[in-house]
Amino acid sequence: MQEDKMSIISRTRRDILKGHITVKTQHIASVLVQGWPDKITSIESELTRIPGVESHGSNDAGKLILTLEAENDAGLVETMSRIEKSQGVVTASLVYHHTEEMDDA
C-alpha cells in the first residue's frame, strides 16, 4: 500500500506534460440543449446517434438534457461542437464536467 502511494506522489506535473506518464481518463459532461420546439423529437433522435451521447429527456419548450462521455477533453469538445452545429439546435450549454482516472484493471 505504501509503495502504491509513493508511485502516485512521484508523478510530477512536468512528467505528465512531457508525456512520460500516461493516465487513462474518462470525461463525463452534462449538457442542456435548446432546440426549436417543433423539431425537438428529431433533434433528440439525431443527437443520440452521436457516439457517447445519451438523452435524459426533453420537453415541449425545446429543452433537452444530454450526457456526454469521451476519453479525453478533445473528444468532449468535438462532440459539443457537433451538437452545436446540428440542424435545429439553437444553443448547447455545458452544465457539468467531471474527469476520472481509470484503472488499468
Image (tube, rainbow, N blue to C red):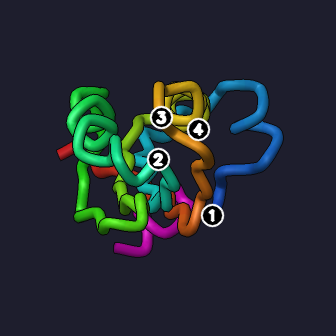
**Residue 93 badge:** none
Rendered residue at 49%/54% (across/down): 33
Q: Position of residue 102 (x, y in %)?
A: 34, 50
Q: Decide: marks 2, 4 in contact (CB < 8 A)?
A: no
| Number of the front mark, 2 or 4 | 2
The residue labelled by disc 1 is: 9
Rendered residue at 51%/55% (across/down): 34
In the picture as drawn, the residue positioned furthest to the front comes out as 38
The residue labelled by disc 3 is: 88
What element does badge 3 sit on? loop
CA separation in Å, label 1 and label 4: 24 Å
| Number of the front mark, 3 or 1 | 3
Q: Decide: marks 3, 1 in contact (CB < 8 A)?
A: no
| Number of the front mark, 1 or 2 | 2
Q: Decide: marks 3, 4 in contact (CB < 8 A)?
A: no
Q: Decide: marks 3, 2 in contact (CB < 8 A)?
A: yes
